[in-house]
Amino acid sequence: MARQWRIAYPGALYHILSRGNDRREIFRSNADREMFLDLIGEFSDRFQIDVFAYVLMDNHYHLLLRTREGNISKAMQWLGTTYTRKFNNRHGVGGHLFQGRYKSILVENDQYLLGLSCYIHRNPIRAGMVKRLGDYPWSSYLSYGYARKTPEWLKTDLILGVVAQSGEDPRQHYRTKVQEYSDESASVWEDVKHGLIFGSEAFVTDIRSRFLTDETNPELPQYNRVKKAVSPDEMLKRMAAALDFDLENAIIKKRIPPSDRDKRDLLLYALWKTGTLTNQEIGKYFGLTYSAVSHQVSGTEQRLKQDKKLADLFRVFRGSNLDL
């Protein structure tokens, strides 16, 4: 598995996602969750990190944070290693707990924090774990919406300060913002560039000039996405050509013969796997909703483990030098 290219500097903002190995549970009990949150407190203090939002799901977690010292790799390595050791000791197991390295998306500035916090906090709703976010205790939502269960290391003032500008009670206004947030129409995802950066094209240009040096490992797929800056349409055409897939029927006429459905599924999965397009953007190409894309991706992942013919087709496809 290719390692993800890391961009790090003092004051950098990140949306972090880390999943369990093979999507297995990383939290088996509330005691595990409490242990992880205690480690987040130590992580924040030890590495000078401001944590703005979090959610703990069964098999993954999200963090929204700022590194004061530009040390994201060192900090996340400590967090993952320390939690894995404690988890394995508690449950009498061994081996890897997390699925490779964590995923990080660099965030341009504070203007994205509100939208990203809404996205993070709505995870339990999307997963069908609760109907009301106020009933889910393992995220920072209660600290924002109700001033409850607020650890010292959680920084809520910045985001609440944004919603307070309306003149309404900031916590009530925040609850309204989260309730109104729609995964289908959230504009924050329109500013994801190359699967690596939340921000403007000017910010991408700045990052490219500061961090894409001759010493950067050119084998990292994220490096090539930013450096080459291939448009989504061009990427789709190249992938379809590699699969010998009829784009006109699939995208324009929305007609896919049964013999091409596996190719369609792989094309959609490959677009998702690059991290370059959001689920919403992928859905526009195929006439699918955000949630339908997520369902399709999960289904294809499972089929690739069980269907040798499909796995062989994907292996040939990956050999087409498309940075997958």
Image (spheres, rainbow, N blue to C red):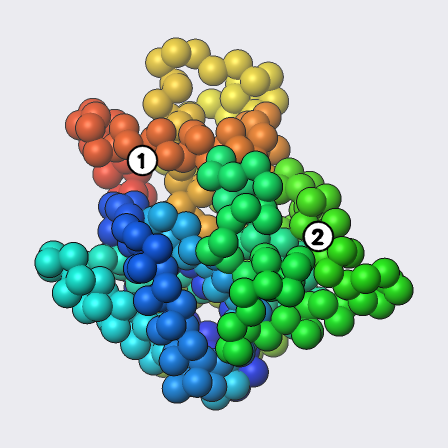
Left or right of residue 205: residue 10: left
Mark 1: amino acid: Glu
**Residue at position x 51%, y 29% from top?**
292
Which marked residue is nearer to the observer: mark 1 or mark 2?
2
The residue carrying mark 2 is 175
Between the residue at mark 1 and the residue at mark 2, the CA separation in whole angstroms equals: 35 Å
Secondary structure under the numbered disc 2 in the rendered image: helix
Residue 57 in the image, given as x and y percentages of width and height: 41, 50
Q: Quadrant of residue 168?
A: bottom right
Is label 1 in contact with label 2 (beta carbons under 8 Å)?
no
Residue that extends furthest to the top in the rendered view of this protein = 258
Secondary structure under the numbered disc 1 in the rendered image: helix
- Tell me which numbered mark, 1 or 2, is placed earlier along the sequence: 2
**Residue at position x 11%, y 58% from top?**
92
Mark 2: amino acid: Arg
Left or right of residue 319: residue 48: right
Residue 252 in the image, given as x and y percentages of width and height: 61, 22
The residue carrying mark 1 is 301
Residue that extends furthest to the right in the rendered view of this protein = 167
Crowding around mark 2 (Cα neighbors within 10 Å: few <14, some 14 to 19, many 20+) is some
In the rendered structure, find residue 237 and report the number of the disc placed on it: none
